[in-house]
Amino acid sequence: ESVSTELNKEVVALLKELLRFQARALAKDPAKAKAKKRLVSGLREVTKSVSLGRAKAVVVAPNVEQVGGDAGLDSMVQNIIATARDKGTPVVFALTRNKLGSAMGRRCRMSTVAILDYSGAEELFKGVTKAAKALAKEAE
């Protein structure tokens, strides 16, 4: 779960590019854009997309607070991570909750973001997954 500044920059660039594509599609055809989202955020949306196998990758902020109980934020995030790993979906630990929210263009904290479609940003996506794998190997 180590995070590097290089990985953070690549994740922010990828998220901003995907948000730009999503905004462009929304301006063109709002109904079609809602049906073909590129990113989803929020614990319920991310959980649903991961469990249905729609998520291509999951970005998780490593600074999630520990909360007791089964319905706590940390246990929900751990559930998302476990489901993603079972499905073979890459899990990228990057940014902080505040930075993840601002990268998504919102003024709130976010714990997870699921990438549903990265077409048009393949190089950025490959860079992010490669950097995340390299960090995971270093941590072992």
Image (spheres, helix red, strand yellow):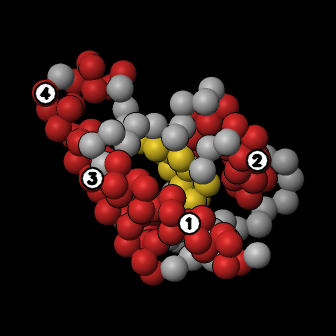
At horizontal 60% and vertical 74% (from top left) the residue drawn is 135
Name the disc covering residue 34, or none: none
The answer to which of marks 3 and 1 sits earlier in the sequence is 3
| Cα separation between marks 1 and 4 | 34 Å
Residue occupied by mark 1: 132
Q: Which mark is residue 82?
A: 2
Residue 71 location (% of width, % of height): 78, 46
Q: Position of residue 127 (x, y in %)?
A: 42, 62
Dividing the picture into quarters, in which one does residue 68 lie? bottom right
Q: Nearer the viewer, residue 128 or 20?
A: 128
Compared with 82, 45 (above or below) is: above
Give the residue pinned by disc 3.
17
Select label 2 or label 4 by which is in front: 2
- Is label 4 in contact with label 3 (beta carbons under 8 Å)? no
How far is mark 2 from mark 4, CA to CA?
37 Å
User: The residue under label 3 is which amino acid type?
Assistant: Glu
- Sequence-first tag of 2 and 1: 2
* For discs 1 and 4, the disc positioned in front in the rendered view: 1
Q: Amino acid at mark 2?
A: Ala
**Element at badge 2?**
helix
Q: Secondary structure at mark 1?
A: helix
Instruction: State which tag comes first along the sequence, 2 or 3.
Output: 3
- Real-space Cα distance between discs 2 and 1? 17 Å
Q: Is residue 40 something one can see in this rendering?
A: no
Q: Which residue is mark 4?
A: 28
User: Which of 102/3 is in front?
Assistant: 3
Q: Is residue 78 left or right of residue 52?
A: right
The amino acid at mark 1 is: Ala
x and y percent of residue 84 in the render?
Answer: 68, 43
